């Protein structure tokens, strides 16, 4: 028997583009995203218009779109199978039951999650973002609400961060945007395709109106990711879970509390971060763990892996440290891993820049034809807005395009000469980048690091080139038959390495 009334669960969000007849819908508890085209997208558009927890009538959809009720019911049953629709009105106990079913689900990755694939190799998110950006829209924006933070991480790249306890923090020096200004930004970008927002900082929970912003994004059906250390969420986990965030990314630098707290320079921070992640996990809120590798946690980063597995976080670690956005080179000069250390660490398949076969197969260093169009998603479908309203390509790429206090964000993007030039990038626009064999092992290629280091996006910055050269050297050694680990485990080799213990100071050159 077919229903006439279905209900849209509160754990769903998404967007519909009527002009292009495309839609995307997220199940934020199962961590899945789905792309729709043509008539299917038109139907999903009406489902989304019902609002979270709202009802949708088969007959009304049929009359509106001139599609048979039988076809609508068949399609709605498919949506129900993915929990994008349900057949009965949703009660609190239904939400609690579904949360329990979703606890421990792994977060899908673009590399291996087939269930969200559309045509070719694009994921649902990529397919929708490509269409939105093709017509000048903005798919995602990062809102840096504040540079203030509960912690004082030694490697932090935000302006005003300190490296030791004797320095004065300048992280609160920016005149931050107001709640009303953020609402105007969100309204403007929603009219131009905005689908996803990352709330970051600093720590966003240092911003006094953060909950108002989270609520406003929820009301606008935005898939919201939150980047935090968790300290501002202690005791507020249920409040956040009620907004069904798409992802909460927490920083965890070690499974050993003393190492983590040494990096954050905040006693007790490890214990509080773990407590928050544990509670969010119990509420089926998707958790990802950010863990950059540096001298301080080299010996203990393996102890983070059990937590990544427990929470369903992506098993990835990053060896690329970003120097301070105000020019301080302390991170790369004192905290970055040495070549000897990287030769071991990059053998770990859980490291983003690893040199395992899946990461280096079939690289043709004679072909530069792929260097066409924007080399990353920055300025293509994603942007970032700093605490004082500067619009920049991304959190790591700080070329200022304009300021929202003097011009609408959509106008800044639409009229920016840099954005137009960036979207039309060709191989001839590259300077030193991709002129050497080792350039093809620059992964992931980050024009933001280049810009911050040299003031140029497509000329190799020292941080990018450093990793690329080491990866290239390792691969040559492996291809010649060299046993880099000498028949030992990665962890055993790491334990044999020495680490640097420096007194950290800000360094400008």
Image (cartoon, rainbow, N blue to C red):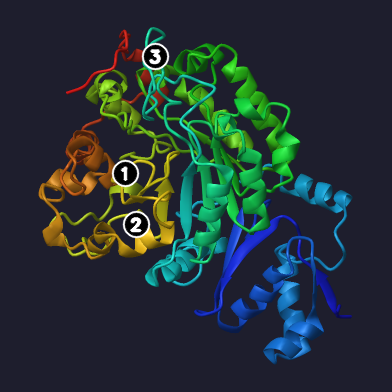
**Mark 2–mark 3 contact, CB under 8 Å?**
no
Q: Name the residue: 23% across, 54% down.
A: 363
Tell whether 296 sits left or right of 467. right
Q: Name the residue: 32% across, 20% down.
A: 335
Q: Which residue is mark 3?
A: 168
In terms of secondary structure, where does tag 3 sit? loop
Residue 354 percent coordinates (x, y): 34, 39
Q: Nearer the viewer, residue 474 or 74?
A: 74
Q: Is residue 477 visible?
A: no
In terms of secondary structure, where does tag 2 sit? loop
Tell whether 172 sits left or right of 484. right
Vertically, is 1 above or below 217?
A: below
Tell whether 57 sits left or right of 28. right
In the picture, the quarter occupied by the C terminus is top left
- Whichever of callouts 1 and 2 sits on the residue coming sooner in the sequence is 2
Q: Nearer the viewer, residue 63 or 72?
A: 63
Q: Which residue is mark 2?
A: 379
Q: Which residue is mark 1?
A: 397
Residue 75 percent coordinates (x, y): 71, 78
Tell whether 89 sits left or right of 308. right
Q: Marks 2/3: CA distance? A: 34 Å
The quarter holding residue 463 reads top left
């Amino acid at each position: 028997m077919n229903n006439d009334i279905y209900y849209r669960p509160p754990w769903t969000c998404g967007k519909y583009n009527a002009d292009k007849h495309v839609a995307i819908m997220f199940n934020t508890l199962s961590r899945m995203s789905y792309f729709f085209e043509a008539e299917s997208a038109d139907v999903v558009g009406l489902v989304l218009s019902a609002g979270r927890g709202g009802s949708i009538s088969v007959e009304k959809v049929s009359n509106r779109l001139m599609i048979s009720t039988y076809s609508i019911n068949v399609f709605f049953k498919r949506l129900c199978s993915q929990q994008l629709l349900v057949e009965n009105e949703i009660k609190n106990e239904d939400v609690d039951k579904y949360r329990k079913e979703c606890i421990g689900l792994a977060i899908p990755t673009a590399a291996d999650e087939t269930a969200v694939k559309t045509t070719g190799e694009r994921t649902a998110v990529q397919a929708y973002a490509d269409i939105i950006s093709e017509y000048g829209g903005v798919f995602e924006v990062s809102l840096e609400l504040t540079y203030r933070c509960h912690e004082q991480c030694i490697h932090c790249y935000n302006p005003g961060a300190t490296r030791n306890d004797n320095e004065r923090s300048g992280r609160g020096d920016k005149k931050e945007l107001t709640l009303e200004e953020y609402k105007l930004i969100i309204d403007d970008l929603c009219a131009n395709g905005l689908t996803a927002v990352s709330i970051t900082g600093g720590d966003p929970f240092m911003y006094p109106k953060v909950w108002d912003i989270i609520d406003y994004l929820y009301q606008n059906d935005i898939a919201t990711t939150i980047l935090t250390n968790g300290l501002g969420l202690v005791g507020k986990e249920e409040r956040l879970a009620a907004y069904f965030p798409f992802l909460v990314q927490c920083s965890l630098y070690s499974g050993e509390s003393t190492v983590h707290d040494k990096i954050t320079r905040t006693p007790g921070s490890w214990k509080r971060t773990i407590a928050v992640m544990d509670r969010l996990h119990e509420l089926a809120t998707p958790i990802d763990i950010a863990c950059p590798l540096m001298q301080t946690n080299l010996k203990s980063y393996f102890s983070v892996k059990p937590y990544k597995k427990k929470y369903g976080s992506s098993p990835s670690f990053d060896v690329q440290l970003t120097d301070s956005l105000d020019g301080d080179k302390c991170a790369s000069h004192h905290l970055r891993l040495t070549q000897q250390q990287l030769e071991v660490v990059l053998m770990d398949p859980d490291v983003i820049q690893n040199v395992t076969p899946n990461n280096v197969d079939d690289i043709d260093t004679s072909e530069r034809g792929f260097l066409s169009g924007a080399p990353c998603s920055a300025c293509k479908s994603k942007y970032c807005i700093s605490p004082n309203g500067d619009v920049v390509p991304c959190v790591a790429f700080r070329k200022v395009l304009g300021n929202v206090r003097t011009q609408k964000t959509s106008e800044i993007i639409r009229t920016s000469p840099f954005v137009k030039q960036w979207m039309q990038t060709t191989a001839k626009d590259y300077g030193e980048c991709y002129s050497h064999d080792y350039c093809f092992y620059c992964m992931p290629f980050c024009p933001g690091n280049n810009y911050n280091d040299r003031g140029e996006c497509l000329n190799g910055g020292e941080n990018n080139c450093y990793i690329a050269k080491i990866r290239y050297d390792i691969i040559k050694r492996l291809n010649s038959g060299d046993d880099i680990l000498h028949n030992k485990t990665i962890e055993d080799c790491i334990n044999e390495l020495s680490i640097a213990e420096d007194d950290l100071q800000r360094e400008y050159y």
